[in-house]
Image: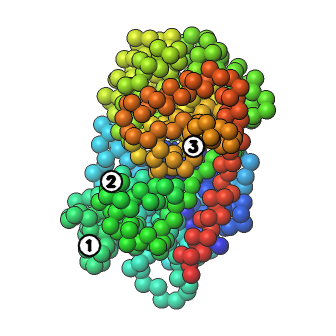
Amino acid sequence: MRILQVSAELFPLLKTGGLADVAGALPIALAAAGQEVRVLLPGFPAILAGVVDLAPVAELRAPRGDTSRLLFGRVQTTGAPDVPAYVIDAPALYDRPGNPYENADRQPYDDNHRRFALLGWAGAQLAQGLDTAWQPQVVHAHDWHAGLVPAYLAFAQRPAGPRVGSVFTVHNLAYQGVFAPWHFADLGLPGPAFQVNGLEYHGQLSFMKSGLYYADRLTTVSPTYAREIQTSEQGFGLDGLLRARNGVLTGILNAVDDQVWNPANDTLLADRFEARRMAGKALSKAALQRQLGLSELPDAPLFIVVSRLTEQKGLHLVLSGLDALLEQGGQLALLGGGDAWLEDAFRHRAVAMPQSVSVTIGYNESLAHQLFGAGDVTLVPSLFEPCGLTQMYGLKYGCLPLVRRVGGLADTVVDTTLEDMADGEATGFVFDRFEPGDYARAMRRAFALYRRPTDWKRVRATAMRRPVDWATAAAQYIAVYQQAIA
Ligand code: ADP
Ligand code: GLC
């Protein structure tokens, strides 16, 4: 099958969160399963710099008449064939430093509707044969940034040739790409698109709703989240539409790219390790404690956080439980960036107790690997979590996840209850209610298990052996693509 994947980010070229990890790994897994995959990306500086052998393939004429160039090249990978990539070269829209969505003051760019309409437009044009050498059979659009692909396709004139299927994946319903109604004219869609049965959302334009309404098939990134977004609590106003379309909605759990995240050959760690050879983890812990200025105590359980610092991630629970964590002899190492109040609050705690609390504000791929390699417990107490990747990295690196039972966290971590330990299923610590008391009890369980080294090692080995490969997810996506074409 010929598949075109459309996304705003792609690891290792440009990443602000898990979307990039998925957009980078899925094409490789699909290619390994025998599919012919190409990706389409906006020409942000990091993408133009990272895609190799770029050459023009077509001129792209946007609905408002502006023209830009569509380039074609390759994304290099480690240990897999390169991924063919189209890039939209539109400097007026994309040539801006820093975050792809926001300016230096963390405000969304005023012309985001045009920047991402062009991404959707280019995806739909490729589906209609813009590149005479290659035409996809299915277009797979990710998140609101690519949400207009299915709308443009739904309204496209298709004289001859086979129908191209569209699949839209929700990575996070909290970010919807909602714009003022007067921008509708800029999109180049016909009037009927701006209706309740279309992309109109409470009088505004919603790129997310466009994807959800017009795509042939919908997916989201875990089975539990697929159910949650059909409820008013987690539907962000789109639950009605999602319930109406539930027959075409599938939850497909994300996985872990073994070429990027594998403690057995991760050169970013002080030493390598695997389930039956764990000395390297102790070494990595000592090295990281030294590097971060934490007391070099091998038996102090090291709790880590690698996260965007936003309300979604529930980090005020970590703050509220920090005294108890320290009183029980634990250490905390956090890496993250986001909301200023959270950055300040964590920084403040690190300044007060530098031997026990380390806080690194910013984005740092190497340190992220080192934290999973060194840590004992990965904290992910999210309010909501479509899938979550850091708990899976925690599992793989033997840094047991402590998570709230929500979204993909509920689908990937098994609590250390006595029965699940006896059955050899337990892999971490899970709590239910989003409140300090429940979080504190889960943390108590983590400390209690840590003081029983034989049990700790058994749970850790189970976590590290849990399969999280992309091949399973790729097979499920292929089934969805086939349905979209049928
Ligand atoms: P989300 O996409 O909601 O942010 P995920 O858990 O799916 O959450 O993915 C987050 C990804 O971003 C992971 O690969 C994680 O390691 C990475 N990440 C988050 N914050 C940082 C940071 N400050 N530095 C490096 N990597 C980070
Ligand atoms: C989103 C979600 C996260 C998910 C990621 C990749 O950013 O917040 O839970 O893992 O997308 O699908």
394 and 454: which one is in front?
A: 454
Residue 417, which numbered label?
Answer: none
Neighbor class of circle 2 (other Cα within 10 Å; few <14, some 14-19, many 20+) is few
Q: Could you tell me the amino acid type at mark 2?
A: Glu
Tell me the mark number nearer the camera, choosing from 2 and 1.
2
Q: How many marks?
A: 3
Q: Quadrant of residue 243?
A: bottom left
User: Which residue: 51% across, 38% down?
Assistant: 430
Q: Is mark 2 within 8 Å of ligand 2?
A: no
- Res 484 quadrant in image: bottom right
Residue 116: image location, x then y, percent: 39, 59
Q: Earlier in the sequence, mark 2 or mark 1?
A: 1
Of the two numbered discs 2 and 3 on the same chain, state the one appearing first in sequence.
2
Which quadrant holds residue 391? Answer: top right
- Mark 3 → mark 1, Cα distance in angstroms: 39 Å
Can you give x and y, in whole percent of width and height, for residue 339 in the image? 34, 34
Q: Earlier in the sequence, mark 3 or mark 1?
A: 1
Question: What residue did someone put label 3 on?
Answer: 413
Residue 67 in view in this figure: no
Cα distance between the residues tagged 2 and 3 = 23 Å
| Residue at numbered disc 2 | 233
Task: Give the quarter of the figure containing the C terminus.
Answer: bottom right
Q: Residue 446 vs residue 232: left or right?
A: right
- Taking depth in this image into account, of 410 and 192 the one nearest to the observer is 410
- The structure residue drawn at horizontal position 39% and vertical position 40%, both measured from the top left corner, is 433
Colour logic: rainbow
**Crowd tier of the residue under label 3, counting other residues whose Cα lies within 10 Å: few below 14, some 14–19, many 20 or above:** many
Residue that mark 1 sits on:
196
Residue 479 appears in the figure: yes
